[in-house]
Image (cartoon, grey):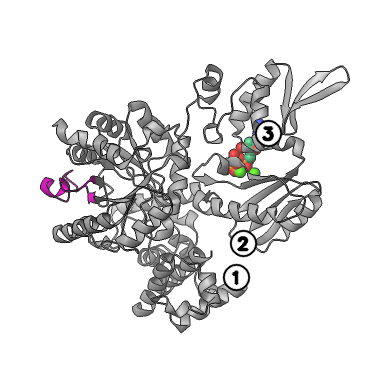
Amino acid sequence: MKNKEISAIFNEIADILELKGENRYRIAAYRRGARSIEGLSESIEQLAADGSLVSIPGIGKDLESKILEYLENGKVSYLEELRNETPPVLLEMLKVPGIGPKMAILLYKELGVTSLAQLKKAAREHRIQGLPKIKAKMEENILKGIEFLEKSRGRTPIGIAYPLALELLEALRTLPHVERTSYAGSLRRWRETVGDLDILTTSKRPQEVIDFFVKMDNVERVLAGGKTKASVVTSENIQIDLRVVESESFGSALNYFTGSKEHNIRLREIAIKKGLKLNEYGVFKKTKQGEKRIAGKSEEDVYKSLGLPFIPPEIREDSGEIEAAIEGSLPELVTIDMIKGDLHGHTKYSDGHATLEELAQLAKKRGYRYLLISDHSQSLHIANGLSRDRLLKQIEEIDKLNARMKGFRLLKGSEVDILPDGSLDFDDGLLAMLDVVIIAVHSKFKMGLDKMTERVTTAMLNPHANILAHPTGRVVGIRDAYEIDMDEVIRIAAETGTAIEINCHPLRLDLDSLNARKAKTAGVMISLGTDTHNPTELDNMIYGIGTARRGWLEPGNVLNTLTADKLLKTLHKKRSRR
Ligand code: DGT
Ligand code: CA
Ligand code: CA
């Protein structure tokens, strides 16, 4: 599906037009096109094939021709022209979080910088804060933004890497002689970003697999090619390493290339202590004749030969899993089939793209028993937050739908803004009418550590506040967490019986796995919510599960493994507590 790529292209065109001070209606047209493509549930390729691109809201003849051009040639000449006409530093600046087109032009004109390095230097030397309309705080944010960009450059968010890996594996499986395939590396450990993608297959004819791999459509460059391995870079600038191994070695190769390196080192030490040799080809024992392979076909065998139970890939970070495996105290990690419902969803009432009924049907179709409707609250104007009256109307509509649906229930909720003073955006009387209340920060991110911690913990004291959503506000590769003392937030969550969300959007994954593990230790329940704004985003549950598993979470730590009745009973204990 190329929807994301095309929506990014239209946004970039809009950005550059804005830099050039072009007509604002034209700019708005591209932004609108980008937004509606982002919200589509069908693939743009399919719509193009059906000749129905112009039926997408905001897509006229002009944008249609650009989509068709991209689908055909992999580029849009108009954008290439625009890029060529624009000083590269401006294009780079647009990638810095916190710098929009207006700010970029100002910095460019006033400072005369021609690279991000120069801009960084200017910020360090405090030459930015004196400029018209620029405060000291902005200078600090620009500096942070550049450092953030430098840090995240080169790593691919899991939301891009995972679908790419699945596509690739599917293509490789069509080859004759390919039997087993898997992704490995940091992706299999479900890290939130991957440095490169590691893919393994077995085949008796490795050269055929390698030839196919290096000639795939989206391969831009071949970095290295051999008889059994190759590395390529895709047109989206993602490196993929492929290794073709023999069936007898698949398990040990999978184990080796899944890592982490630190985990591998510990395993090798254990092997050596047992007088064994462990490498990517297998586990070997010395004999009079030389050496004999005693394991390698499957990962389970490899661990078994070392006297260990199977350790799930997500926790192979040498952060206690080896000790737990030796002691027999490994966690029984939560799995996606244990999930009975999704606990965060938006509809057309606020800024979502689906109706209540559409979302309910989709959730039911994927086997869920419930879905929490949590549209935004009144203060969040940019997201079309619901007034009291509209929320009451939604509650009524949900009751009617629930009366009609069998074996499935929409839970009535709201994603209520935590206002800067820590109070909630709806009164307690209204909150008491809801099944589940999500609370979240959507404004004033830069209050500083103490004030933000106080704001959030104050909100958690409200007896109706059930789930704290995306508690640090970070967006992977785009925006760092705001300053907040998560240890204190987790402590108050445990004390008040407030659950904390792992937001499953692949760019949020907030809580992250480290904080999720802390929450588990403190006895805090975790809620998994996709925060779906369009129907395809219900699929993002898998990323939340990956993060939960990396955080050592077991089914008993996760609200979504409960039936709706049990879930409400658990959450409502808080109401009678005070
Ligand atoms: P990434 O790509 O930076 O997100 O992280 P990984 O973990 O995917 O790292 P990568 O692609 O460099 O290597 C894949 C796996 O191969 C890694 O997790 C463990 C294994 N590996 C690579 N280099 C070494 C090494 O020097 N020693 C050991 N023991 N294992 C290694
Ligand atoms: Ca890797
Ligand atoms: Ca690699």
The answer, for residue 8, to whether it is visible in the render is yes
**Ligand 2 under 8 Å from disc 1 Cβ:** no
The residue singled out by tag 2 in the image is 235
What's the residue type where badge 2 is placed? Ser
Residue 550 circle label: none
What's the residue type where badge 3 is placed? Ser
Give the secondary structure at mark 2.
loop
Q: Position of residue 486 (x, y in %)?
A: 32, 35
The residue singled out by tag 1 in the image is 74
Query: Seen in the image, is 475 located left or right of residue 231?
Result: left
Give the label, 1 or 3, closer to the camera.
Answer: 3
Furthest residue toward bottom: 61
Image quadrant of ligand 1 equals top right
Q: Which quadrant is the C terminus positioned in?
A: top left
* Neighbour tally class for label 1: few under 14, some 14-19, many 20 plus, Cα within 10 Å: few
Q: Which residues are magenta?
A: 415-436
Magenta includes 429? yes
Q: Position of residue 316 (x, y in %)?
A: 55, 31
Q: Main secondary structure of the magenta part?
A: loop
The residue singled out by tag 3 in the image is 298
Q: Are marks 2 and 3 in contact (CB under 8 Å)?
A: no
